[in-house]
Amino acid sequence: MNRHILNTGVQYFINENLKTDIVSVVLKGHGFPGVESKELVQQIEVKEKCREKLPTWFNTPGIYYPKRLNIEQTSSEITAQYKVGIVTGNSLLDLTGGLGVDSYFFSHKIARVVHCEIDPDLAEIAKHNFRVLGRTNIDTHVGDGLAHLFRSRPKPDWIFIDPSRRHNAKGKVFLLSDCLPNVPENLDLILGGAGHIMIKTSPLLDISAGLKELRSVKEVYILSVKNEVKELLWILRSGQQGEIAIKTTNLLPSGEEVFNFFMSDEKRAIPHYSAPLAYLYEPNSAILKSGAFKLIGARYGLHKLHEHSHLYTGDAPISFPGRRFKIERQLPFNKKAIQDLGIAKANITTRNFPLPVAEIKKRFKIRDGGPDYLFFTTDKNGKRIILKCSKA
C-alpha cells in the first residue's frame, strides 16, 4: 500500500480523471513524487468500478482501492447488506476477509467482527478503509483465517467464509473442495469453531453438489439481484439434522421477491400441464436455480407448458415472483409463421428449445427491444411453438 496515493493532490487528480481515457492519463504524466503512473491508473479504474458496486466506498473521501481482481471477487453492497439480515449475536469471524465489504456491513449489527486476510497488502488496505469509514469494532488480522480460528477463544457466534475461487493450478473453480481454503477438508474445525457458519459460494455451484461436499446444512439462500443470481449462501449449524430449507430472494428496485420451501416440498409437488392459456409466467432466476420446477406451479395454481420448459400458464393475472405476460398469439415454429408476425424487433426468450437466442435473431433478422416478447419453447405435446406476448 503506497500511502503517497492518499495525498490531497493525488486524490484530487484521481477524482478529476474518473471519466478520462486511461491512455491519456498515462501519456500526460502527473509529477507526483513516490507515485507511479500504473498506480494512478489502478486507483482511477478500480474506483470507477466501485461507483455502482460499492457506492459507500466510492463516495467516501480517502478510500484506498486494491487491485481490480479484489473488486471483482468482493460482494456488492446490496448483497452484503442482505447477509446482515441473516446473522445474529455479538461476535463474527470473517475467515477470508478480502477488501472487507462483508465485514463492514456485519459490523453494523454485530458488536465485534474479526477480519482475517492472508494477503498483507490487502489486509492493510482493508484496515485503512475501515478507519476512514468510521468502523471501530472491526479487528484486522493478517494471516490464515483457519489458523486464527484454531486459536480463537472464546468461540465467535458466527463464522463467515467466502473461499477464493481461483486455484493456483486449476484456474477458476467452483467446487468447494477446489477453493481456498478447502472448506470440506476443514469442516470439522469450522463446525467446532462457532455456533453458526455462513459460506458464500459461486452462483454456478450446483446445489446438489454443494450438499454432497457439506454436512450440517440448515438453510441454502439463493440471492439474485435484478434477476441475475449473484450468490449462494450456505448456513451450517453443528449437529444440524432434519430438512434443509431453500430460501430464494430476487432483489429488485421495487422490493424483494421471496419464495421459500423445503426440499421435500418439491419432491411431493404434483405438476399439472396445459396448452397456453391467457397468461404466461416465468419464475425469477433464483427460483429457477433452486430447482422448484413443480412446486412453483403447484403453489400458485398454475400449469406447466412442458416438463422441461419451466414456463407456466393460467387464466387470470396473479402476483408472481417473476415475470408475467399476456399471451397475444400462439404460433407453430416455422419460417412462415415468423414472417407473418412481421416483427423486426422483439425481446426473445428460449425455454426448452433447440436454438439459442443469438441464432434465432440472426436467422430471422430480429433485433433486440420493443414492446413485443417472443417465447420460443415446447408445449406439453412436444411441439415447438412461439408465444407472442406483452408485459402484463
Image: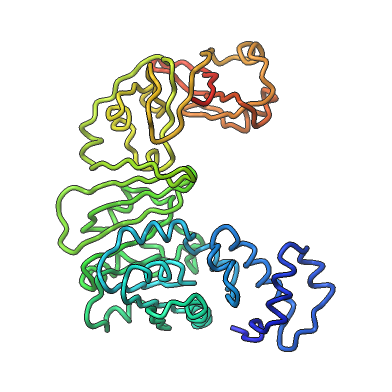
Q: In this figure, what is the number of numbered marks?
A: 0
Answer left or right for 199 relative to 74: left
Q: Can residue 155 be seen in this view?
A: yes
Tell me the residue at 29%/70% (across/down): 186
Of residues 188 and 123, the one nearer the viewer is 123
Q: Residue 92: name its quadrant.
A: bottom left
Above or below for 267 versus 134: above
Q: Residue 90: name its quadrant.
A: bottom left
Q: Residue 6: name its quadrant.
A: bottom right
Measured as percent of width and height from the top left, residue 97 is found at: 42, 72
Measured as percent of width and height from the top left, residue 7 is found at: 67, 84
Q: Can residue 144 be seen in this view?
A: no
Tell me the colour scheme of the image. rainbow
Tell me the residue at 62%/86% (across/down): 3
Measured as percent of width and height from the top left, residue 48 is found at: 65, 63
Tell me the residue at 39%/78% (across/down): 138
Above or below for 160 versus 301: below
Quadrant in the picture for the N terminus: bottom right
Of residues 204 and 248, the one nearer the viewer is 248
Of residues 142 and 4, the one nearer the viewer is 4
Residue furthest out toward the right:
28
Measured as percent of width and height from the top left, residue 180 is found at: 41, 68
Tell me the residue at 32%/32% (across/down): 296
